[in-house]
Image (tube, rainbow, N blue to C red):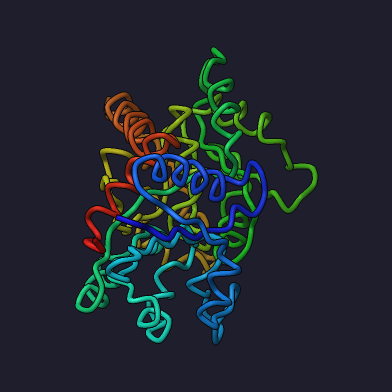
Amino acid sequence: MKYLVSFDAYQSNWYVGELYNKFYKFFSSQYNCEYVHMTEFAKIHGEPTNYNQNLPSLFNIYNLIVQDKDTKKTFVHSLHDYAVVMLEHKSAIDKLNIKAFSCSSNLTSDVFNKYEKYIKIIPSFYILENLSDYLDLQEAKKLKQEKIKKAYFNGLCYGHRSQYYNIFKNNLLIDFKNKNDSNDYKTKQQYYSTVSSYKYGLSLNGAAKICYRDLEYFALRTLNIREPLNIITYDQLKEDQHYKVIIDSDIQSKIYDESKFDYINEKINNKISEIDRSGELDYILNNSEKWFDENCLPEKQTKLLCKFINESEIS
């Protein structure tokens, strides 16, 4: 079998490019492969590499394209936050004869059911920001710190997050930091050290429903408390097994009503206290740490990419 493999490593230490590089080295040691840079591959097919009619191009830097040179059938893996909207590029999908598409960001059951009728959807994994983050997480994990019995959040505050900042900024059980504020900015090493010292880590949806901090909490054994996470992953993440939902639909419906701020804070604090009393903390921490080790290490993800290609039936 002969494969054409295309991606853009972009820059060193950037996790997406580093992962695809590792995959290519492994995959090409098993099969006859030809590498074509994503920019060149896009030119061959007359497609852009950034946006196409306001939708991310299938040839963007977050994607890996693998094509069987004999069958001309193609597999695409995407780590783009808006990966699922690329499935609207029917003309590009037809040009490449794409038979399977793999992602996790914003891959809900509704999206899966909508597109699986004409293309095979393979649920995938999520990643950290930089390859070096693994070493920094390992170092932070070695720190023996007594856990602060509060929830911690430090991130960019935009959209709904800005409103949650307004709600939680005076909450005694939540240390909510705004990364937009230079006073709250931390280096990765400082951030991981701080996260590891907290019993709970608050995760709020951003561009994608899942984000770096979900994985970071898993790795550091800081209990992930968050909004509902209704995406499909290869190894399915489950409420009450890998994380706890404390921001339910009732709270989500009231965050723009200032008269409900006290109600929201009281409800959130009661939920945190209930977790503390439940005795399920170690169970969830063990499961989430195991999930991280099995789904988020580069070596494991390289093998998963090979598995997805086999499942794609392009050969």
Q: Position of residue 181 (x, y in %)?
A: 76, 50
Q: Quadrant of residue 87?
A: bottom left
Residue at x 39%, y 60% (from the top left corner): 66
Vertical placement of 114 versus 256: above or below?
A: below
Q: Position of residue 55 (x, y in %)?
A: 52, 79
In the shown orientation, is residue 99 left or right of residue 177? Answer: left
Residue at x 66%, y 35% (from the top left corner): 188
* Residue that protrudes farthest toward the right in the picture: 182
Quadrant showing the C terminus: bottom left
Q: Nearer the viewer, residue 269 or 15?
A: 15
Q: Nearer the viewer, residue 288 or 70?
A: 70
Q: Nearer the viewer, residue 3 or 65?
A: 3
Residue at x 21%, y 61% (from the top left corner): 313
Residue at x 55%, y 44% (from the top left corner): 18
Q: Quadrant of residue 74?
A: bottom left
In the shown orientation, is residue 104 left or right of residue 232? Answer: right
Quadrant showing the N terminus: bottom left
Vertical placement of 171 versus 150: above or below?
A: below
Q: Nearer the viewer, residue 36 or 290?
A: 36
Vertical placement of 280 versus 100: above or below?
A: above
